[in-house]
Amino acid sequence: MIELPETPLQRVGARELFLKREDLLPYGGGNKVPRFLHALAQRNGERHVAALSDYGSHSFTVLTAMARDPALAIDELELWELPIPPDPYHDALAGRYAEAPNVTIRRGSTVGLVLRWVARGRRAGVCRLGIGGTVKDAGQTYQPAVEACGRQLLEAGVGGPAVHVLPLASGDTAVAVLSALRACGRDQDQVAGVITGPWIGHARLSLKKPEGFHLVKPRARSWDDYVAGARTCHGETGVWLDPSHTLPAWDSLDRLPAPLRDLPTVMWVTCPELVTPPFPA
């Protein structure tokens, strides 16, 4: 499996607030990178990769970037594109893979597309990722980043417990980070998952949350609210955040449960790197 570089822990101002810059990983960056590298490393020689996710998803853009790397041996991408209301951000991401070579896009209604996906099942010669980019047994792939984060916190003078804030779509990344924190001895750290995905992604966590895990409901935002919030965040951090996941997490830092608000805070930037504003100037 390809070894990923260590991403920086960026302090925000003079506060004990940090950004864990997973957006600076290769292949465009974001939490999908280690997950998909893990899945590709488990293949049995398949050079055809299929995935089902939303229109303009981070999953599709990361896979398209990976397909350009000969070392990963992807000859064909089959992208099953669930319909969502369009916006400038997702339109721009969809443009990255719509015209890419050796990409087949399958479209339809949500129900129809999912039923067709399930009916097809596994096929010889095809590596199928889980719906929405989930990958079986991928939790261990976040261990190096979590260990690096713990070391970086110590170097920044944070020796006590911290709270780690992550968007919660499927829940896989946030739960994996909590597990990795415990595995590397950070027993007092907490994880706050900001709900950004469909109910099915957090339903099981609502019923039975692991110890040290907290669910946070974000504010409702219009597109105009997002643009204003993204500009404010960029002015403070120099980082552009996406509308679906990381900006709602940033916007929820003052909505954390009371016991967590005084802890040093690490917000994980899990979206791909956005070099320019993710909306028209």
Image (cartoon, rainbow, N blue to C red):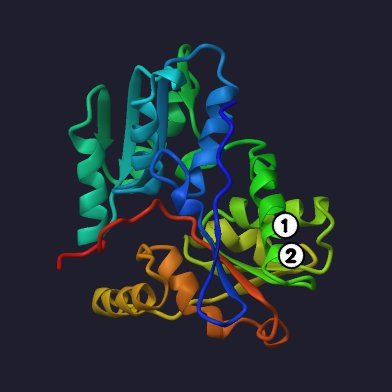
Is 36 placed above or below 19 here? above
Q: Classify the position of the N terminus by image quarter.
A: top right
Q: Nearer the viewer, residue 43 or 280?
A: 280
Q: Amino acid at mark 2?
A: Leu
Q: Nearer the viewer, residue 89 or 1?
A: 1
Q: Is residue 185 left or right of residue 13?
A: right
Mark yes or no: residue 144 visible.
yes
Mark 2 is surrounded, within 10 Å at the Cα level, by few (under 14), some (14 to 19) or many (20 or more) other residues, namely few
Contact? badges 2 and 1 (CB < 8 Å): yes
Residue at horizontal 26 percent and vertical 54 percent from the top = 90
Is 218 placed above or below 115 here? below
Q: CA distance from mark 2 to mark 1?
A: 5 Å
Q: Give the image location of residue 200, x and y in percent.
A: 54, 57
Q: Is residue 228 left or right of residue 194?
A: left
Q: Which residue is mark 1?
A: 151
Residue at horizontal 68 percent and vertical 44 percent from the top = 144
Q: Is residue 189 left or right of residue 248?
A: right
Is 18 placed above or below 106 here? below
Q: Nearer the viewer, residue 1 or 54?
A: 1
Assign a secondary structure to mark 1.
helix
Q: Which residue is mark 2?
A: 154
Q: Amino acid at mark 1?
A: Arg
User: Could you say which quadrant of the image residue 185 lies in?
Assistant: bottom right
Q: Give the image location of residue 273, x and y in percent.
A: 38, 53
